[in-house]
Each structure stands twice: as structure tokens, then as C-alpha cells.
Amino acid sequence: MAAQKKKGSSLKNIVTVLTAVAAGAFLIFKGQAPAALRDYIPPPLQSILYPEQGAKKSGGVKMNNLPPTEGNTKINTFDSAKNKLEQLYIDAGHFTTFYCGSTFDENFKLDHSKSGFRFRKNKERANRVEWEHIVAAESFGQSFSEWRDGHPDCVDSKGQPYKGRKCAAKASKLFQRMEADMYNLVPAIGEVNGDRSNYRFDMIPGEKREYGTCNMEIEGSVAEPPDDKFGDIARTYMYMEAAYGRGVIAQSNIKLFEAWNKMDPVDKWECERARRVEKIQGNKNTILEKACKQAGL
């Protein structure tokens, strides 16, 4: 059985190498690698063979000194990732939302009594836990042709074609894995998740607070998280950039995230969470591994 498994793995590696070579040949002679091969290319080679995918977001500028890291290759659906994360938090006994510090029980029933959170408008959604993408799905989704242009498989029951996130989640295996990457998902109060939407993170002048004492600010199309989440967010963006190479970090945010990473170092839970995600998802987050070792955590 072991020999058969090894033989299958070797064959898969050969196919991967041949696919990468074919894509490289097209890039050299045609100026563009075939979109059909993109999902079969290892993430570290994505930005080389498909340089256009990060150009719109980052102008070709990359963060420096990001250690190589692998992305998710094990979990293929967002729902599966959410279920696994729920169990992870229950097993760890960590019942705290990411932004505002409200607590929840094993049934994910929220309690805002100690956090000082107050709902802004949507009381119903303010009382449920939702799993939020720190790097918004649209931030990397726009680099997929299925999101932008649709796909032959993306046709509804009435025969009408569709595109966007729904199509990318159906037709692109790489998008499925990125959408389901547990390192990029955190438990958030539903209303905060909805208000943040796909907005970018940045600093907002003043201290406008609309969620009670929770220091989460959202204005226009910008979100400013609490100070103690600066580093967590920066390091998540760094991981997603290093793992998938699809230009998730905008040029204007490079210096900001470098500053946030220094201002808010890793803490015990961030490191423990990463180790637990690695056991479930299978890939190591080398961004956090390095930071946790340096911090002795």
C-alpha cells in the first residue's frame, strides 16, 4: 500500500512539473500562460507564470522578506472550513470574537455583557458568530477569470450564465482552497463582519466608534481594527501573499502592514491557533512559525 501511495505521489509530481513547464513555454513564446493550467500550478509559481494576477492590485510591487510557505491543499469548501474551525475553538476552549472581544459558548451563542459591544443597526446579526475572511474573498477573487468573466460550468437553472464569487467557488479548485483557508478565517460578530464587507484595512482619522466600547471603526470603504489586532491582520495578509501570490496586498498597504506587524507582535493564542490549524489543514504558516519562535511562543 505504501509503495502504491509513493508511486501515485511521484506521478502527481511529474504531472505538476510537466504542467509548469508547459505553462512556462507558453509564457515565453505567447506572452501569456494558459488560464486553463492555472489551477494545477503550485502557488509559489503562480506569481511567476501569471504575473498579471497581482498587477492590478499591487502594481507588481511585492512585500520583501516573506519566507516561502505553502497554501491550503486539503480543505476544499468554505463550509467544511467553518465546521472545522468551530471544533478547533471548542477544543481549545477559546470563546472570544476576533475584533470586539465578545464571548460565546459551545453553541456559539454570543454574550456582549463584558466586552461593551453595542449593535449599530442590525441586532439580529449582532447576536450571531460568523466566520470572516481577514483577506476578503474579493481581494483575491478578482484575480480569477471565473470571478471576472464566468465559466462554461457557471449556468443557473434557467440557462443564464453567472460569474463572481459563486462561479469562482464552483469552477476553480484554487479559489476553493483559498476561500477555505483556515488561517484567513476568524470568528466575528455578524454585524461587524457585514459592515466590514470587503473593505480594505487602513487608519481612519479620529475615533469614531459605533459599536459601544469596541474599537472597530468602519468609514466609507475603509476599516480600522482595534490596535491589538493590527499584527494579526498584517501577518494574515503576509501569509496569503506568500502562499498564493495573487497580489492580495495593495502597494499602498505594504508599509502599513510592515508597521502593524512590528507594533503588535504575536501573542500566545495567535501561535497556538496556528499550530492547531496546521494539524487540521496540513500546511505550515511559516510567517507565524518564524514570529512565534522569535517571541518564544
Image (cartoon, rainbow, N blue to C red):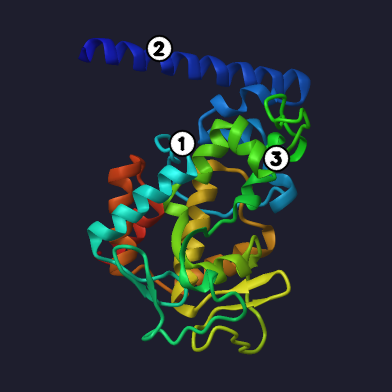
Picture quadrant of residue 102:
bottom left
The residue sitting at 36% across, 67% down in the picture is 266
Give the amino acid at mark 2: Leu
Foreground residue, 80 or 67?
A: 80
* Image quadrant where one finds the N terminus: top left
The residue sitting at 68% across, 58% down in the picture is 251
The residue sitting at 68% across, 42% down in the picture is 143
Question: What number is the disc on residue 147?
Answer: 3
Pointer 2 residue: 11
Give the amino acid at mark 3: Trp
Q: Earlier in the sequence, mark 3 or mark 1?
A: 1
* Image quadrant where one finds the C terminus: bottom left
Q: Could you tell me which secondary element the residue under label 2 belongs to?
A: helix
Q: Earlier in the sequence, mark 1 or mark 2?
A: 2
Foreground residue, 226 or 150?
A: 150
Foreground residue, 288 or 137?
A: 137
Query: Furthest-left residue in view?
Result: 1
In the image: residue 44, left or right of residue 171: left
Tell me the CA gap for discs 1 and 2: 22 Å
Q: Could you tell me which secondary element the residue under label 1 belongs to?
A: loop
Give the amino acid at mark 1: Asn
Which x, y percent locates residue 87?
30, 53
Label 2 packing within 10 angstroms: few (<14), some (14-19), many (20+): few
Question: What number is the disc on residue 76?
Answer: 1
